[in-house]
Amino acid sequence: MTDLTKLTLAEARDGLRRKSFSATELAKAHIMAIEAANSALNAYVLPTPEHALAQAAESDKRLAEGTARPLEGLPIGHKDLFCTKGIRTTACSKILDDFKPPYESTVGQNLWDAGAVMLGKLNNDEFAMGSSNETSAFGPVISPWRRIGKDGKPSTDKLVPGGSSGGSSAAVAAGLCLAATATDTGGSIRQPAALTGTVGIKPTYGRCSRWGIVAFASSLDQAGPIAKTVRDAAMMLGAMASHDPKDSTSVDAPVPNYEAALGKGVKGLRVGVPKEYRVPGMSREIEDLWQKGIDWLKSAGASIHEISLPHTKYALPAYYIVAPAECSSNLARYDGVRYGLRVPGKDVIDTYENTRAAGFGKEVRRRILIGTYVLSAGYYDAYYLKAQKVRTLIKRDFDEAWSKVDVVLTPTTPSPAFAFGEKSGDPIAMYLEDIFTVTVNMAGLPGISVPGGLSSEGTPLGLQLIAKPFDEETLFRAGQAIEDAAGRLTVQNEWWTAGAGKAREAAKKPDKSPGGKR
Ligand code: GLN
């Protein structure tokens, strides 16, 4: 029988409907893959196999009855930033401790209503702050990808899977789910997708409900999927998106059939190439990747236009004022009284201080300090208000561009996956990971990252496409053209199962040691 974890979401959907396998078999194959990989990759912080098998049994019933819903029986991973009713949700922070939400996020509910099966909660940077998954209270996620040395042999250096949705990207790339949910405040869907050879789309601000997602920076946060292919991402987003009266910024507009957009091609599409994204020091291989993307779209029938987005260089500094400001306000709710962890003190202030000092990690504390500073009297106008004005200018740059082009093409990240510790000691180097992605959040636009090829180290690189508000269909069309030309990137060497295989073998052998069980 074929390895069910190697299927795409679309292939699995077709296989289930043809009755080539059951939803229970599909869920079991993934549960076993998670068991074999999790100690090496740490992608899941809470596998939920029983929950998955119960949902799969319901799906099998519906498939047999002919009442299958769009994602019936398809097993996915769920970022631990989404509240799950009665199932531990931590945002990968100690401060949420053993929090079991009394409600389900709207995006999650939409997926379960569409028939999807939840395999478990996925690791992420603490409160989604980070670009490498190194800030998680559960420890880092290890990328399934490895560099290929000059001798052609894989290196044993552990690489980051990107962040903050590093559990999502690693799990999809390693076949530990067919697709995953993720969130993106400044690049957390697109950057991990780029670093792991997967597809990630951050939809327009307002397309997916934020209700029930642990808040980081409310004016920037959006949910979206990470998937194996552009088609799979279209299937996922179609189910995740909805109007939700419980989120006042959710937009009351019908959700198009994104899959239908895929066949439309890019003939006549006007593609903008912003000159300001040629940042100083950009590596040769990123320039080459970008040029390949341009050539692919051109040969598929699109026209290429150089455009200018003059305020690009201010986006990153402005983001690192707006995002911490909103985070400092959102995270004020973790006071040791209402949620999760409580470290008692001699009075209420002491309890707050003890709880927050014990509960928040270093990066989260850094953001709270920056945010509190830029919002304080005397500095508000100089920093926060100024950053908001810059934000308006960034948005206007794009408004201007849309009179000339339909979509913008850029690289997703300035470099391929890096090794652990390489950037974690230098916050500025880490923040530079977001240089091409934050503008999209600042302007509220949709952006997709699609694999574009391998770096000289044999690791994935991604191309980013940006479109007008609520024009995700154009992203899927153009993304499909890139995928058709570049091909899919899949990990060849499944090193992470080796240890697990040995452990299983060892467990099977009778223990002959003195006092061992016979
Ligand atoms: N890396 C960015 C940050 O740390 C973006 C994170 C995100 O999109 N959640 O703020």
Image (cartoon, grey):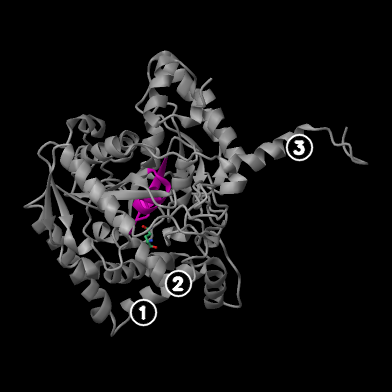
Q: Reading the chain from its start, which is encountered first: label 3 or label 2? A: 2
Q: Secondary structure at mark 3?
A: helix
Q: Is residue 102 visible?
A: no
The quarter of the displayed image where residue 374 is located: bottom left
| Residue annotated with mark 1 | 373
| Residue annotated with mark 2 | 426
Q: Position of residue 2 (x, y in %)?
A: 51, 23
**What residue sits 27% from the left and 68% below the top?**
280
Q: Position of residue 185 (x, y in %)?
A: 33, 57
The reply to whether the C-beta atoms of the residues labelled 2 and 1 are less than 8 Å apart is: no
Quadrant containing the C terminus is top right
Measure how far apart labels 1 and 3 are at the Cα level.
Answer: 55 Å
Q: Secondary structure at mark 1?
A: helix
Farthest front residue? 151
Q: Amino acid at mark 2?
A: Asp
Measure how far apart labels 2 and 1 are at the Cα level.
Answer: 21 Å
Q: Amino acid at mark 1?
A: Tyr
Q: Which residues are magenta?
A: 180-198
Measure how far apart labels 3 and 2 are at the Cα level.
Answer: 42 Å
* Mark 2 burial class by Cα count in 10 Å: few <14, some 14-19, many 20+: few
Q: Position of residue 517 (x, y in %)?
A: 87, 36
* Left or right, 88 with reference to 404: right
* Mark 3 burial class by Cα count in 10 Å: few <14, some 14-19, many 20+: few
> Any atom of ligand 1 within 8 Å of the CB at mark 3?
no
| Residue annotated with mark 3 | 506
